Amino acid sequence: MPSGQRTRRRRCCSPLLLALLVSCVACQAPPVPAAETPWDGKDVFIERNYVPQQCPRTVGSGDFVRYHYHGAFPDGRKFDSSYDRGSTFNVFVGKNQLIAGMDKALLGMCVNERRFVKIPPHLGYGSEGVSGVIPPDSVLHFDVLLIDIWNSDDQVQIHTYHKPENCSRTVQVSDFVRYHYNGTFLDGTLFDSSHNRMRTYDTYVGIGWLIPGMDKGLLGMCVGEKRIITVPPFLAYGEEGDGKEIPGQASLVFDVALIDLHNPKDSITVEQQYVPESCERRSQVGDFLRYHYNGTLLDGTLFDCSYSRNRTYDTYIGKGYVIAGMDEGLLGVCVGEKRRIIIPPHLGYGEEGRGKIPGSAVLVFDIHVMDFHNPSDSVAITTHYKPSNCSVLSKKGDYLKYHYNASLLDGTLLDSTFILGKTYNIVLGSGQVVLGMDMGLRDMCVGEKRTVIIPPHLGYGEAGVEGEVPGSAVLVFNIELLDLVSGLPEGYMFVWHDEVSPNLFEEIDKDNNGEVLLEEFSNYIHEQVNSGKGKLAPGFDSETIVKNMFTNQDRNGDGKITAEEFKLKDQEPQGHDEL
């Protein structure tokens, strides 16, 4: 600042105000006499132009400082400036490395404080001056801005300003961490930020991958913790700096948020959150699971969720279909169980990551097991009630009427004939139900109640039934058999209860023209059924059965049956369906 401006500033201040300004120098600074009278030139004159609100530390004798300055004579002529050189002046205070007046002027300064200093000749360069630069007996004016301060006795300073309530693990030597940071100098100047790169800094701790001060400053942190780590230069980049953004002898301040933490020796961690009281079976290698999950990073950031897709994740376990940590974490679960699986990156997606998952990330899966089975599973049948008289058992071809409740393994109701108020009616073994139900309904007696568990390969398979049954779902049917009509022997659509007439064709051919039309054939068969002499296969449309029987007898397909075409079952070639 030109000396004329300095003069005008001093003129606007009362002696009392000037005394107050001088008295504000921090406690480490030597007392400066109150300037109630004009400067007498006997001692250093200090004017504190700016003092930051926060001043945790002031310059003491023996400290190392970095500061900028303008040096000028009282008439305003500049004789030196650190700004012109583009670098701070770096020096120990109180060790005779400065002129005596500057040694005194720097005492008690805060980082970012600005002082205007007058130094008399006997505390400056005296009667000799500096040849070609400072004449003898020169009063020197300095405009000083303190940038940095440290002491050789300093250690890393740690200030934690946020710590999560749950801190089950802290950073130890050889751990691998992922963290965000802002890196500044003591004066607040930003020199680096992981936030600006939108990527965490990932590194091992305590094995020399970091500057020593950061290696020490990260120890003991929890995931989610935020702390400020202040590192003196001899534990950072020292006298040389990093050759880029960080000058030599610079103290560094890192505002750190720990995102992730693991050790290369870690295995998965399983936390059981809910286990059903009844757990008859636990998952094993080779089983096929259906489960819901929320996938997050250690800091809680969600990267995937099956619930949002409204569909379970379906996979084999122990076969390499999923990441190694999940393969292991899904073993031994029960249907309905909820557990948290924490997977270190070497058992997850490794250094590269995938999609929304960054490299070297620890993964947290909160899973809910909905269903599992093994491809070798068959139908499981549990009988809950069987009548004392249970001599007639269901078999292939029988016509059954039954009630059922159908659900998934987790209890989700799919369908119920009880709710519909009508039975479900089928011919057993005719392909009218899934194969597992066909198997589950066999050897039942009327009045029996049983639970039938059907694996998907005997149910609706991988596709399921859109909007009704999920793919690869195990089905649970609670069944009550209400009625059973015995079916016909395999291969028969109609049987006689009495002896077959030797003149059967003539009896069917009512008009004795030697030809039987469909109407004649149908009328005759229905007469036999109605009179109790014959029986059609139960559970099918009678007209359809009769038409099929007629078609089988109409060998040449001309719409009529002749005596030559007409044959009974025992007269048929092997494999041909007939009466």
Image (cartoon, helix red, strand yellow):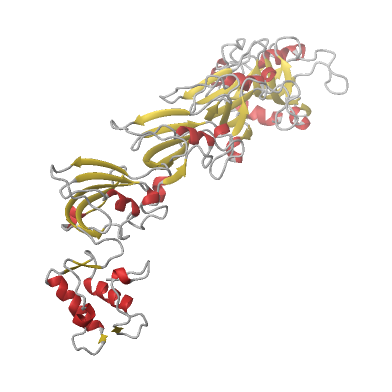
Q: Residue at x 15, y 69 (%)?
A: 533
Snapshot quadrant of residue 282:
top left
Q: Which residue is more in the foreground, 546 or 209?
A: 546
* Picture layout, residue 476 above or below residue 105: below
Q: Say if residue 570 shows up in the picture.
A: yes
Q: Position of residue 484 (x, y in %)?
A: 18, 56
Q: Residue at x 23, y 65 (%)?
A: 537
* Picture layout, residue 311 above or below residue 382: below
Q: Which residue is more in the foreground, 496 or 402?
A: 496
Left or right position of 298 against 239: left
Give the residue furthest to the left. Answer: 531
On-image quarter of the C terminus: bottom left
Q: Position of residue 535 (x, y in %)?
A: 19, 67
Q: Say if residue 363 shows up in the picture.
A: no
Q: Position of residue 279 (x, y in %)?
A: 32, 32
* Picture layout, residue 483 above or below residue 52: below
Give the residue furthest to the front. Answer: 502
Left or right position of 179 against 444: right
